[in-house]
Each structure stands twice: as structure tokens, then as C-alpha cells.
Amino acid sequence: MQLVEKLANSYKLKLNQKSNKMKKKVLIVTTLFSSMLTFAQEASSGDEVVKNKKGYEILPKKGDIGLGFNTIPILDMFLGTLNRATPFAGSANIVSYVQASNNQIVGKYYLDAKTAIRGRVGVNTLSGSMTAQVQDAEAMYKASLGTADDIAAASLLRVEDKLKFSKNNIIVTVGYEKRRGYRRLQGFYGGEIGFGTNGSRQSVEYGNKFSDQYPIQFTNNFNTFNVTTTNPTAPGRTVRNLESKNRGGFRFGVRGFIGIEYFIFSKISIGAEYGWGYSITTRRGAKSTQEVYNNGQKGPEVIIEEVDVDTSEKLKGFSVDNNNGSIFSMNNTLGGNTNLGGGSGALTLIFHF
């Protein structure tokens, strides 16, 4: 009888051990499955609040504003300096690694953590005047009819040639941006529309009027302040500019873009983007008003001429960002230069608030 009880107890013990092992296996499997499900839900949602070690949120959220600028000009200057044949030999030796939409402020407003309205604005204007002094031709002529002392005194007198100028280059773009990603690395895509204008003009007032009685001096180049002397007895034409309207025009375009953004610190990111768009660019021809002293067969005469010195253009088509002619590219209009070389492939530094 005792032997039977011992066998029964041994059998029950084995059953309990097997049951405990089974329960442990079920518990382990359940825990692993639950952990995997939780991880999958977190990874797939992408909506978790990402924080740094100090507990500050890293990514922008609804209502945040992002402000930044294109860092390519700084990068071009730095890398170009390293690549010069002769270091610091002059700006002409700088290599432009990426031609981009320089001189623009970048801004974003977040509708939510994954959607933003964005804009880029570049308003560049320059105006001023230059004054050059030349000899007073009329005073010298009147003094030549008097004594040597009169001539010596008149030779010290000066009149002013004065140039006034104004230049502008304005571009504004507005876009819609969608974002997705995980933790610090975010991808974005969207579209934008942009328009811009540019142009320049100048006018000159000369201190000496053209004369058929005495030689006069006038400034022929306000960059170097070179002076020309006009002799009334010399045959032919002498031309000087009174007013110039240099190349300028209007630009309009639509553009799609893609890019990536990495948050190096809390709410501070470096973003790189590239795009493709359609643009229309119109450019008017340069015009000038010039004063002409002509000593011809009919005798000396002064003529005011209106001259079209250039042709107008209209360009349209599709373009990647680094191709010429894009509405989103931009450079200075100084000297009437409105060549739209380069594009808006950009490397931006953005601060979020």
C-alpha cells in the first residue's frame, strides 16, 4: 500500500513540474509577443514625442515657427577658398560648388507636426549717388578773355557731374510641405509657387553743358571717374549718357521639391532639398537717353537721342534647380545683370520656436 502511495505522489510531482514549465513558457511567449506588438505600434505610429537627454522636445509641433537661411553661400566661400590655386588670390578664383537661391530668408509655420506652410523671401535693393568734380568750362572760357590772374583763379573752379542709380531684385515664394520620418531624421516633400522682379536704372546730371565755343570736361565713367574733354572744333560725334534703364523683367514659376532634414539639436535642424519646376521669365530690353554733340556738315549741334540698345526676351520651360533660367534662382542686378544662372538646390539651417 505504501508503495502505491509513493508512486502516486511521484506521478503528481512530475505533473506539477511539467505544468509549471508550461506556464513559464506561455508567460515568456506572451511577454515577447506583447513587447513586439508595443514596439511595432510605436514604430508604425511615428507620433511619439522625441526628447533629448534633458527632456526637451526635439521635433517641431503644431503652432511652431521655423526661421532660417541658406548656408550655401557660406559653404561656397569656405570650400572655394580651400580650392583656390593660390589661396586668397581674389574672389574670381572661388569655385561655386552649388549655385543656389542666395540672399533669401526661409520661414515655416507648422499646421501640425507633419504639415507646414513655408515661404522664402528675398528683397534686395540698392540706390545711391556718385559725384565727380570737373573743371568749370564756362568760367575758364570767360577768364580766357581776361588776364592771366583771371585764368589762374578760374582754373581752380569746379562743377559737379552727379549720377543717381537704383537697383532691385525681389523674389517671393509660398509653398505647402508634408513631412514624415522617425526621430531626428525627417523627410519632406511638397510644392511652391513663386514670382520675382528685377531691374536697374541710372541718370546723370552734367555740370558743363555742351558748347560750340569752348572745350568742356565731363565724367565718362563713374566707376573709375575717367574724364573726357570735348573740343568744339573737332569733327564728329561726342556722346554722353543721360539716363539708362538696364535689363530687368518679371519671373513666375511653380516647383515641386523633396528633401531631408536632420535635427542636430533640440528644434535646430540642417535641411537639404532639391526641386524641379516650370517657370516663365520675361526680360525687357535696355533703353537709354543720350546727349550728342555733333560737329558735322551743318555745323555744331546738340541732339537728344532715345536708343534701344538691347532686345527683349521671353523664356519658359521646365528646369531642375541647378539649371539656368529658373524663377527660383537669383543674383544681383548691379550693372543691369539679370542672368538667372543657378537654382534653388539648398542647404538650410533652421531654428524652430
Image: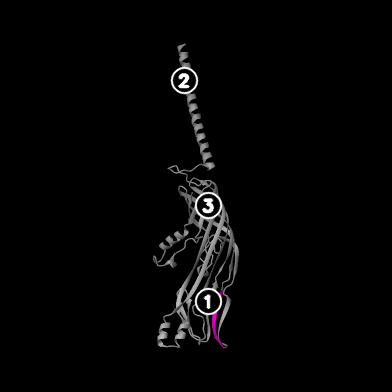
Q: Residue at x 48, y 19 (%)?
A: 12
For the residues bearing labels 2 and 1, Cβ distance under 8 angstroms: no
Type of amino acid at the residue the image marks with label 1: Asn
SS class, disc 2: helix
Q: Nearer the viewer, mark 2 or mark 1?
A: 1
Specify the principal SS of the magenta part: strand
Which of disc 1 and disc 2 is earlier in sequence? 2
Q: Nearer the viewer, mark 3 or mark 2?
A: 3
Q: Which residue is mark 3?
A: 108
The image shows residue 149 at horizontal and vertical percentages of 40, 86
Say how many tags the image has. Answer: 3
Is 147 situated left or right of 277 in this image? left
The image shows residue 175 at horizontal and vertical percentages of 57, 54
Picture quarter containing residue 44?
top right
Q: Which residues lie in the magenta part?
A: 288-297
Q: Which residue is mark 2?
A: 13
For the residues bearing labels 3 and 2, Cβ distance under 8 angstroms: no
- Label 1 CA crowd tier, 10 Å (few <14, some 14–19, many 20+): some
Which of disc 1 and disc 3 is earlier in sequence? 3
The image shows residue 9 at horizontal and vertical percentages of 47, 17
Q: CA distance from mark 3 to mark 1?
A: 46 Å
SS class, disc 3: strand
Q: Is residue 293 part of the magenta span, yes or no? A: yes
Q: Residue at x 45, y 15 (%)?
A: 6
Q: Closer to the camera, 225 or 212?
A: 212
Q: Nearer the viewer, mark 3 or mark 1?
A: 1
Type of amino acid at the residue the image marks with label 2: Leu
Q: Which residue is mark 1?
A: 241
Picture quarter containing residue 308?
bottom right
Q: Closer to the camera, 233 or 74?
A: 233
Q: As drawn, which residue projects farthest toward the left?
A: 87
Q: Which mark is residue 204?
A: none
